[in-house]
Image: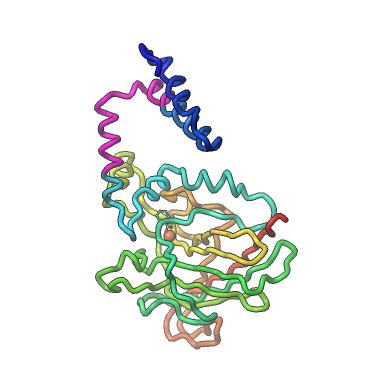
Amino acid sequence: MPIDLTAASVTEAVQKAFEGTADERVKELFSRLVQHLHDFTREVRLTGDEWFTAMDFLERVGKTCTPTRQEFVLLSDILGLSVLLDLIHHPGSGSATDSTLLGPFYVEDRPTAENGSDISGEVTGTPMFFNGRVLDSDGAPVAGARVDTWHSDGQGSYDVQMQDTLHGRLAMRALLTTDDEGRFWYRSVAPRSYPVPDDGPCGEILRAAHRSPMRPEHLHFRLHAEGFEPLITMLVRSDDPYVERDAVFGVRRSLVVDFVQRDAGESAPDGTRMDKPFQTVERTFVLARKEQ
Ligand code: BEZ
Ligand code: FE
């Protein structure tokens, strides 16, 4: 290792130390990471105290993580990194539905549900009926597509945040399958805008910057179908006050939809005569074919 390094020469010395890395991509990632980290440190003349604060912060981010609380994902989200990755790899060209970030509340072990069923898991709230359609870019239905959906309740909480009332039971999420016409539909309760979890280290950043922790009201979707690119996306309520102020920068204009308010006495899309006000939401999703 070279000795007598200077603030200017140390970067190249560290990069050279990675030259034996067998994997070319890993070597490139470390070399460029070192370059940017060192350039940042020189540019802002980072002090020892500031670096210690940052290390302490990252330690606390790690200690906040649990199987249902992903503070590192949240850090990536509030720094705009999650959305940057998505925009680089899914820039939104072509006819396919735009993607956006997954967020920390997707759960692998979600229940499957039949079309038309109530996926609210007995959580109470304003009834919401969702009707979706999955098409290919020529407008043909995609039958047998697997569609995950998940959303918050009317207080803005996800099931995994409701340990006190649900005791680990999952609700307001399901895996559905499209029928021969590419349709899927379900009943649930209407979601609401909510703050990203701000009682941990990431909340400190938001408060220090006087940033709102709010996400506009939305429904999440993750679609898979044989021969098509998977799609992770989200539909955002058009009249929500936070549409243009999403704490995690995840709103795309093409994903903003009307959540239509219906009165008591009207019929729901499934024909049920409703005795209380309810909402309906509709959307067609277009999947891109996998390149051969
Ligand atoms: C969500 O939409 O579920 C979400 C996304 C990023 C951070 C927190 C929540
Ligand atoms: Fe969400």
Pick the quarter of the image with the N terminus.
Answer: top left
Bounds of the magenta span? 38-59
Residue at the location (62% across, 71% down)? Answer: 133
Question: From the viewer's perspective, is 229 left or right of 122?
Answer: right
Q: Is residue 5 left or right of residue 35?
A: left
Classify the position of ligand 1 by quadrant: top left, top right, bottom left or bottom right: bottom left
Relative to the observer, which residue lies in front, 32 or 71? 32
Quadrant placement of the C terminus: bottom right
Task: Determine the residue positioned at 24% across, 70% down.
Answer: 164
Quick check: 133 above or below 276? Answer: above
Extreme residue toward the right, this view: 138
List x then y, in percent, for residue 55: 28, 36
Which residue is depicted at the point 32% across and 46% down?
202
Q: Is residue 204 left or right of residue 249?
A: left
Display coloring:
rainbow
Task: Please tell me whether residue 13 is drawn above or below residue 203 in the rendered image.
Answer: above
The stretch drawn in magenta includes residue 55: yes
The one of 70 and 25 positioned closer to us in this rendering: 25
**For residue 44, which quarter of the picture?**
top left
Residue at 43%, 71% (x, y): give it: 110
Let me know if residue 153 is in the magenta part. Answer: no
- Which secondary structure dominates the residues rendered in magenta? helix
Above-or-below relation of 137 to 79: below
Please state the total of marks drawn on the protein image: 0
Residue 74: percent from left, percent from top = 38, 50
Indicate the position of residue 243 as horizontal and vertical percent values: 47, 54
* Quadrant of res 98: bottom right
